[in-house]
Amino acid sequence: MSIVPKIHWKNITAVLRLPVLHLPVLGLLVCLPAIVPARTPAQTPARSPQPAQTVPPAGVTNIAIGTKVIRTDVKRMGMNLSGQSFYDSAQMLRNITFRNPGFEGQIWQTVLQCKFIKGDSCADTDEWSGWPENFAKGGTFEFFYGAAKGESGIVAASSVAASSAHQGVWVNFGKLAVAPKVGDFYILRMKIPGTADAGWRSATHGGATMSTEFHDLPPNSPGKQALRLSASGAGQSIAMTSDVDTWGGRSFLQLKGVYTLNFRAKALGGSAAINAAVTRLTQQHGNISYLARDIELTNAWKNYSYTFSANEDGTFIGPILVSLEIRNASALLDDFSLTESAAPDNPTAFRNAVVSRLRQLHPGVLRYMDNGTDFGSTIDNLIAPPFARERSGFSEGDKLQLEIPIGLHEFLVLCHAIGADPWFVMPVGTSPVEMKHLIEYLSGPATSPYGGKRAALGQSAPWSSVFSTIHLELGNETWNSSFAGEVVADPLAYATLTSNIFAAAKTSPLYNAAKYDLIMDGWNGVPWWNEQELSIKPHADTIDIAPYTFNPFNDASSTEAIFGPMFAEPESLDSRPTGIVAQQAKVAAKGGVKLAVYEVNLGTTLGQVNQQAVDSSVPSLGAALSVADHMLLMLRDDGITNQALFSLPEYLNGFSDPDHPGHNGTVKLWGSVVDMGGQTNRVRPTFEAEELINTAIADKMIETIHSGANPTWDQPESRNAKIKLTGAHYLQTFAFTNGTHCSLVVFNLSRNATLPVTFSGPVAPRGAVKVSRLTSPHITDSNEYTLTVATAHKSEPNFDPAKSYELPPYSMTVLEWNVTGVHF
């Protein structure tokens, strides 16, 4: 959803759009209407007082590491790419004017359910529908579940009921052979050309107009539209601007290196002059003009390209304005970009800093879900070149989509460049025919129609020959009513749709089961829902969940009140039979599919604590250790090998007190980076924790056994996340090997005690051992205001496993060593 508080910067009003706000409550994600901080965060969060904590039992714990393999085909932990933005850490593409670069039209793909019936018309329950009269007229419909399943055709008319009727849009299907009934689901698809200026901030003066040109297009243009600027009259002018890096008071994108402004244009009715400019508005340095050109256009289409260099040092704080202005003339415009030059080792469409960060993380899988801009898209649109890609809408609450989605080709090139397998979230409206086209695009020879489309984008060899596994998921959280228009809010209906789509994939002659993982959406908080989905054998290989933690956050009275339940919750969810993740693993196994985690992180978006407590706890070292422990426990105890943290970008989201409406704040969540190539270029401790985990993970997980002291604590029922756990373990260990190299991850989850350990077993660490440790002086330390939390590395040339080794409180330690002559 869009949230539009204004940022006033001198004479510029830049619109700040924040991403969809995720609010996990028992697996539910809920959209909040706005972010209005009611409490001002302290610049440096205060340290929580150290509580009186039960001291772990005296004695040494021995960690025996044997040759028993408990998990195979283990993958490095993954990451969600999330969506693109023009204002925060999600400014990820090298073309920073990415929103609608080809001035293309819209497509719309919406899932609706009949809740009210009148003959051959029906309406859903979305009383907040933003569609005007006959918005859907002329679109196509297809029923995929219910009495009218298989009925399809062209929408005869659409209308919106009064909101007092609690009804959404009424769609008239014309005459059907079988009339719909309450509960039927259908997909509505529309093509809406025009609105070429969408995604741009524009101003017209003196009667000037902006419109869409469909016929006079540049030679060899990949798109179907251009923008017509009509300002030939006296005193007429048009100014259009792409606003970049607009977050008030900070910068997430510093210009460094060489940038190229490129566009195609044509004068209408003689010559025309157009002014092109790139400006950074700053308080410290004044307004910096990187480019200002008066360009004479000709009456033939021509490409215009201008290059400049920049070397911003982190102090250039203010919006970047990329603008064009025309006066007393008319012209056509198309294919606009302002692009960072790629580093020699960056073959992708993503900024150099983004690629560098992902290579540092080295995720095993990268998940594509473009925060809604792809929900209503099509496979053809997602593989179209950016200048031909149409804006795609899905929500009945909107009538204009402003941005194009990140393309599948760009995403796959990024995955290849960073060494991660792709996890692609397909639009839920994908048809069986499109599914076959997608398999051909990914696996077909360059001589096939869709293999040829792939080759035309620069990838001749099939993508299935590049990656070990391609993960394909149908829809994103299709149970979640927050994403109305993408939701299939009935487990049997969604499973029926999934079965049809995945069956189409498997009947393709190009489908190779060894190369694909077909994933259906699961609901973490409701095992019954997943049981229902799996009851009809939906041709899926995997079902996925999002086990977010630590919500609500109501008690910040002490460090123990915060981090005791935060550290106990992963074990409660993953390692105990009554835990929700453990239950979901049983549901998946009974259904004959694997279980995956499509998103995981803290889910701290509700509670009664103040802003200072949120700022000091959520982006902290302690939170990072909790999330990392959660991921490794799900691997060890539940066998979940594919997991993806949410997410790489997103600077902050909303935090609200449900008992006091209007008492809203913010939370430094979901992003695992502060920024990438911005004013700090810092990562959050959660990123560091996953990076350290990924250095340790190998393809086999081997057993560890503890003996001697068994330090535990009894977590009393907490107002935070409602956690209660008897015998929660301070020490958690996870060992890996590739046959010749071994690693061990050890957590000390004590909030104030150093714990001694020794090692034994046939592959105990000894001799030359590399030790890496993530900890900090305070459990609440973060990297928000200065680089405080960092992984330390050292070499131990003569490591003695029998000698007591001390693990500091709230720490994660990774030991790495080589072994010879051992069979696993």
Image: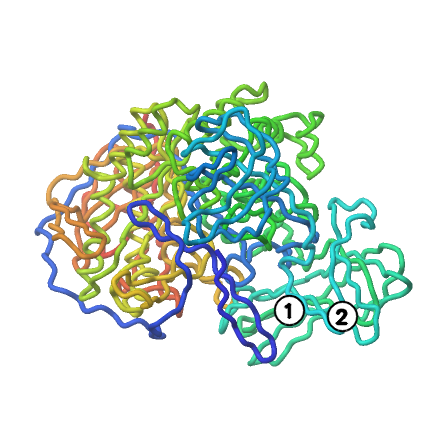
Residue 359 appears in view:
no
- Density class for disc 2 (Cα within 10 Å; few <14, some 14-19, many ≥20) is some
Q: Locate residue 26 relative to residue 96 in the image: left or right.
A: left
The kind of secondary structure element at disc 2 is loop
Of marks 1 and 2, which one's residue comes earlier in the chain? 2
Residue 207: mark: 2
Q: Which mark is residue 232?
A: none
State whether residue 35 is above or below residue 516.
Answer: below
Nearer to us of marks 1 and 2 is 2
Q: Estimate the x, y position of residue 581 in percent, counting from the top left.
A: 27, 38
- SS for callout 1: strand
Looking at the image, residue 54 sits to the left or right of residue 169; the answer is left
Q: Nearer the viewer, residue 624 or 27?
A: 27
Kindly indicate the quadrant of the structure image that contains residue 327: bottom right
Residue drawn at the location 33% of the way across and 36% of the way down: 736
Q: Position of residue 474 (x, y in %)?
A: 48, 35
- The numbered dot on residue 321 is 1
Residue 193 at x, y percent in the picture: 68, 48
